[in-house]
Every structure is written in C-alpha cells, then in structure tokens.
Image (tube, rainbow, N blue to C red):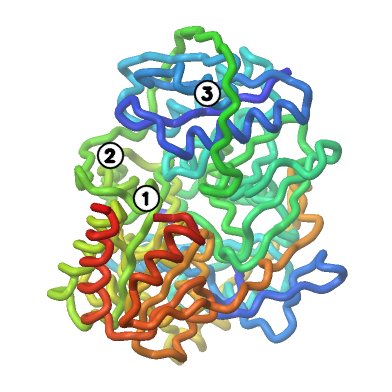
Amino acid sequence: MKILVCISHVPDTTSKINFTDNDAEFDKNGVQFVINPYDEFCLTRAMWFKEKQGATVTVVNVGGAETEPTLRKALAIGADDAIRINVAATDGFLVAKELAAVVKAGSYDLVLAGKESADYNGQMVPGMLASLVDYNFVNGCVDLEVEDTNVSAKREIDGGNETVSTSLPLVIGGQKGIVEEKDLRIPNMRGIMMARKKPMQVLEGSGAAAATNSISFEKLAPKGAVKLVAADNLDALIDLLHNEAKVI
Amino acid sequence: MSVLVFADSTDGKFKKTSFEAVSYGKKVAEQLASNLVVLTINASDASELYKYGAEKVVAVSNDALLTFNAKEYAAVIVQVAQKENATVVVVDSSINSLYVSPLVAVSLDAGYASNTVSAPSSINPFTVKRKAFSNKAFSNTVISSEYKVIGLAKNSFGIHENPVSGVLESFDVQVAASGVKSEKVERVSGKVTIADADTVVSAGRGMKGPENWGMIEELADVLGAATACSKPVSDLGWRPHGEHVGQTGKPVASNLYIAIGISGAIQHLAGINASKVKVVINTDPEAPFFKAADYGVVGDAFEVIPSLIEKLKAFKEA
C-alpha cells in the first residue's frame, strides 16, 4: 500500500497570534511551527500501517523552504520520503490542486490529511483533493482499518458515529480518534539522524490559480473584565444570565 | 442568477443553523439583487423556510437520499445550482455540510470560504469575514472565482425572520452511486448534541473523577444543555472523546458556555470562544479562564454546582 500523508506547517497551538504589514500578514516572529495536530494523528496511523501491513509512507507539504523542518520532523517520526511543492499555500483550492497532481503522479492508494489545519481551519483540502482525483472520501474519520483494498472507517457525526465501508483508492480527512493522543510519537535521536538522509523532493507547482485570497486580518475585539459573583450569592448569577446576558 | 442555500435537515427536521443559512442567503441575494432559492432534501415541511425569506424552495424527496452521503448530496446540490443558475451557494457548518461543501466547490469550480461569520462587506470584489487561527483572529477573504461557496459559521449571522409567500417546487434528481456506504449509525438519542445546543455545560479535571459527573449532567438537564469536557478529561477516559471541546476537539459556538473546573488553556479557549456568553466556575481565581469569561464564580464546584442546580430549578418554576 502506498500512503501519502499531507502535512501542514502551522503555528504551535499555544502561539500568540499577531499581524504585520497593516494586518495583511501573519507575524511569524518568535512563532514556533509544528506539524498540524490533525495531520499528526494521520501520520501516526500511517506509521501503524507501515509497521503492521508493510505500507510505504510519503509525506507532502505545499509551502516554501521554511516548511522543510516540519517535513523533516515527519521523516524523523518514520515516513520514508518527503515531497515539498514549492508554492505558497494561500488558498485551499490551490493547495488541493497542487496535491492532486502529486497524488495522480504517484498513484497513491491511501491519502491521509487532517480534516483541518490549525491556522486557517478551512476544512476544505481533503474533500477537494478527493474530488479532483476521484477517490473515495471519508471526512472526520475517527477509526480506519484497511484489508487488501477493503476499508472500514468510522466518522464522527453530530451526537455519535457512523461506520462506513468503502475501498481504496481513498482520501481520509482525519482527526483525533484515528489514533489516540497517547499514541502520538516524539522523534527519537535515531529517527532524527536517519531523517537527514531520507529523500526530500522539491517540485515546482503546476501553476494552479487561487480562488480565494486573504486580504487582511483582524484580531478579536478586546474583552471586558469578568464580572465576579460570590459563591454564596448565586441568585445574582442567575439574575445576570437572565436579565443582562439574556441567555437563560 | 440566484443564490442557493442548502438547508440541511435531520430526520426531516431543520436545524437552527439551516434557518441561519437561509437568513444569510436572503441577505446575500439582496446585496446581489438576485433571487434566493433554497434546496431541501427529504425535509418534512419545507414551507417552514418561507418565514426566513425563502421565495423559492426546491424540495427533493428521494428514498436513496434518506441516509446522508457526501458525494450523493453534493451531486444533488450541484444539479440544483446549475438548474437555478446559482452563482453563490450557502451551506451551514454542520459536520455533514463541512463534508459536502468541498465536493460542491470542486464540481462548480468555485472558490470556497468556510467559517464565514458575516455578510459580504463588498460584493465587488466579493469579500467575506472568516474565522481563522483557531478562533484567535478573523481573515477578510476575497473570493475571486465566478462561482462561490460560502460555509456559514454557526451562531454568527443569526436567525432573521423575513416572511415571504414562497413557492415550493419538487424536483427529481439522479442519484449517482457512491463508493462509500453507510453501515451503521450510532447516536445517543434524546440527548442535546454539542453542535445543536444553545447552552453547553463543560467540566474539567477540577471534577476530580468520572464518578462526580452526575451533578454536571443534572445541571445540563436543568438548562436543556449539552455536556462537554476538557481535553485532559477525555484523554484520561473519564468522558467519551465526543465530548472533548477545544482546539483538536469539537468547536463550540453556543449562546451560553459554562466551564466548571477548567483552567482555560489557550487550546481550550480557542475551541470555545465563538460562544456568546461564557461563565467560569473555578476554585483558582488566577485560572486563565477568568480573563476570557463574561461571568465568574470563584468557588468549589462541589458546593457551587448543587446550589446552582437548586436555584435554577426554583428560577425555572417561578
């Protein structure tokens, strides 16, 4: 089985979010970048398939050279090789089109991508990619089993889960549950050393056009101070929620 | 030219987010001086949507579409969009809508703006405001393609009544076979889901153990709320993963969010700060959640919650 895991390079979840250039650009100053947490769940599942079922695992990212340390981290976790598509990831549709070219050229059987990225949270790339390459698609996947080309997957729905059957080739939009948090891997020294020698292919983009463009950012409106209510005066809380906030 | 809204339904019934999407579609149609068309699939009473400005409802009834299937639903939306000459398609942000809309966007070759929180600030260029950076900021996004798909964030635009005498048209669709088949649906029945809830009662490690969740559930019952939990609580297995809210869990955009014994890590706040009103109950007055909340009680949950339940019951009966 040939597996492709799509990796987004995103600010660490604890990052302070600031903007520069008249709020037109995200301020990367002092920001630690990591593998998108949703992609990390997918990568870990891919490693399981590699170890238990003999799959090969390629990781791919759409982005500039600054994203290579994130791909190297994925290699250190155990992926076999990496592809970087040298295009700025400005729009989900553009990213999906660039990935589609790689998926077609590599004839991957299974493509795993986090259902969203922790920066733009677009939740568009996996579905668009599946459509563009005409693969089966399961989104919000919390459990994935593959046997030959038969697939059983579970996806999250409002208030529960749905089990679906499908087959390879397949695109998965994954999330926590596809592996558990405790199964996530931290690269060890041997992995980091080996990652340096693993192939990293850089491809120029196909020239796909963006369909959307972020022109400016806004921070959240500053928040007023919390109104404290004494623990022995909960009637006051009920009164505030009823008369002031009008939510009960 | 028209604006098409897909009004999602579950077991034939619309959700509030469907009414919100129709309200939003009405606004966009006005801005574009075009018509609003609303698509329903197996809804029991599509005329409910007239109240929110749906001048024309295209009702699809088809037994092959009784169970949601993203590829099949996308094909239906695309057929109706083409028939109605729709240049803008609006969907809500339910789990199913998020599954289907990227497929619709590719079929229509449309730019797709998910997590949209407001009506277009300009229609030329077509500019909408979207949530970004896990609810820590907004992005003003231009959709430059001729066709556009907008995913409306829950509880952002609001439900606006705008009664019209609408027309209902039934429409037969071709349902193409999908390579993904539903085998089993497991859903807790009779419980408010986090996605649908107006109020969410959420608890963290401050509850000390799963055996103490009775009072959380009782508080949720009194408020008609969904229950949720912080990440450590689901990681410890005290509560099911489906209840985990926060950055890598479920997003919450309820009217009222009550956090009990949750310190308020940045990842947790990112997932819940789209909620309108936040209440924190915590023993530690230095907990970061107090900086993010509207109302706070410094106190021991084991004393505050039972007392709050009693007082809310009295309030509800009054």
Say which residue label 1 marks: B197
Residue B51, label in figure: 3
Instruction: Say whether residue B298 is left or right of residue B300.
Output: right
Q: Earlier in the sequence, mark 1 or mark 3?
A: 3
Q: Are marks 3 and 2 on the same chain?
A: no
Q: Report the amino acid beneath label 3.
A: Lys
| Residue A142: quarter of image | bottom left
Indicate whether B107 appears above or below A100.
above
Please name which of the two marks, 2 or 1, marks the residue nearer to the observer.
Answer: 1
Instruction: Say whether residue A68 is left or right of residue A173.
Output: right
| Residue B238: quarter of image | bottom left
Please name which of the two marks, 3 or 2, marks the residue nearer to the observer.
Answer: 3
Mark 3–mark 2 distance (CA, rounded to whole Å): 40 Å
Of B4 and A241, which appears nearest the observer?
A241
Examine the rendering and report whether any part of residue A6 can be seen: no
Please name which of the two marks, 1 or 3, marks the residue nearer to the observer.
Answer: 3
x, y percentage for residue A214? 76, 55
Of B135 and A168, which appears nearest the observer?
B135
Q: Are marks 2 and 1 on the same chain?
A: no
